[in-house]
Image (cartoon, rainbow, N blue to C red):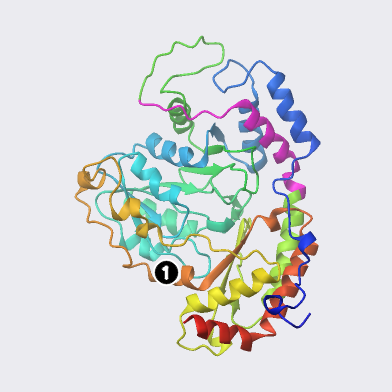
Amino acid sequence: MSKLAAFGGTAAVPRDRRRVQWPLVEEEDRKAVLGALDGARLVSDTDGVNPVSELEENWARRFGFEHCVAVSNGTAALALALAALGVGPGDEVIVPALSFIATGLAPVHQMAVPVFADIDPVTFTVDPDDLERRITPRTKAIIPVHLHGAPADMDRITAIAHKYGLAVIEDAAQAPGATHRGQPVGGIGDAGAFSLQVSKNIPTCGEGGLLVTRDAELAEAMRRGRQFGEVIEAGRERDYVSYGLGWNYKMNALQAAFTTAQLARYDGYERARQHNVTEFLARLSELPGLQVPTAPPDTTHAWHILRFRFDPAAFGLDGARPEALRSALRRLLRAEGVPMSQYQLMPLPDQKVFVDRAGFGSGYPWSVTGARGTVAGAGYPVTRAVIADSLTIQKRHLHPGAGELLGLYADAFDKVWANRDMVATLAKAAS
């Protein structure tokens, strides 16, 4: 086992162990979807209880939210939250420089300008100090992202928001079940957005999203927004009158029924995931030059994605490009059967849609505010460093039975680290 698989040795993870199903589709899920299909209420605008309203109630009760509004996907959830909070043309919204593209696009959908802030080098969530430096008189809202399942520093963020009178919309797409000082993420700011996309910790059978809030009026605004601006009330015949700007952001009954069945098994899955992942990370934390993901103090991490940073100095590569070490480790670990991959190839401000201002034409929404253009490759040093020196593991560890597989992954890391001289040789060749 000492010879690296990339050079003809036996892989640490046998090929027949590498495929892991996620989500787990059980008989309860099939029954739930068929039950919804056989029902008469396939959309959320029907009168009375339906699978969508049942999911909203179950989600709110399980995590302790006062109001929950189901929508078509997580991106729609972010945009709808901004709209319900009055964010629009001429406004700026601060978002982290490291996130999925949807976090940056949601303000643009409202004709607002995303303003990017750098991240913390350990949690990978937005740096409150850099966030505060980027506030201007046009700033209307902040979207902290609980990236990879790690809660952002909500104490600092909410204090800054209160100081400047800003709305806070939590992007909790990757963090259902995560907590910050005992509070569920998503329920700390003015609104929280979750994704139920099939890769998430609590999935649906495709796409879906949820909005949560403590504010009853805000919840009603979100419900109107998802339904063409109409008011849908129990016992009241639909009048097809749009009382304000709205969209068709509804979730269908099949998606809702599937997620409700998944939610019923979530607690068992989560206990197993917390045990498996923390044991795995404890083993890897002993390896020199490897920074493993950690839960910030007084928080619960959802472990949606596991990001690992690599220190070239531990491989005798002082001054070497971190990308070269990352490339060498990716090649060697993947050959051993560990599916290491990158998450985001560039900071959000380097995305062409923002650099080229490819919004609604004629430079909108940037031309409304007179915002300066984004300069690709400039700023955000921590985000750039993290992208350059890290790799991730995604999805496989979400399976509640992944403990043994993660043990094999740890064996593969041990094996590669035992051959650090070879790793260094490959990294030098790639520099």
| 147 is within the stretch colored magenta | no
The residue shown at (43%, 19%) is 230
Measuring from the top left, give residue 5's x and y in whole percent: 71, 75
Check disc 1 and report the residue beneath it: 384
8 shown above or below 115: below
| 253 is within the stretch colored magenta | yes
Range of magenta residues: 245-268
Image quarter where the N terminus lies is bottom right
* Side of 274 relative to 165 (left or right): right
Answer whether residue 373 is visible to the viewer in this image.
yes
The residue shown at (78%, 39%) is 26
* Side of 116 relative to 282 (left or right): left
For mark 1, give the secondary structure: helix
Q: Observer-nearest residue: 35 or 187?
A: 35
119 shown above or below 413: above
Answer whether residue 314 is visible to the viewer in this image.
no
| Residue 45 image-quadrant placement | top right
349 shown above or below 240: below
Measuring from the top left, give residue 387's x and y in whole percent: 47, 68
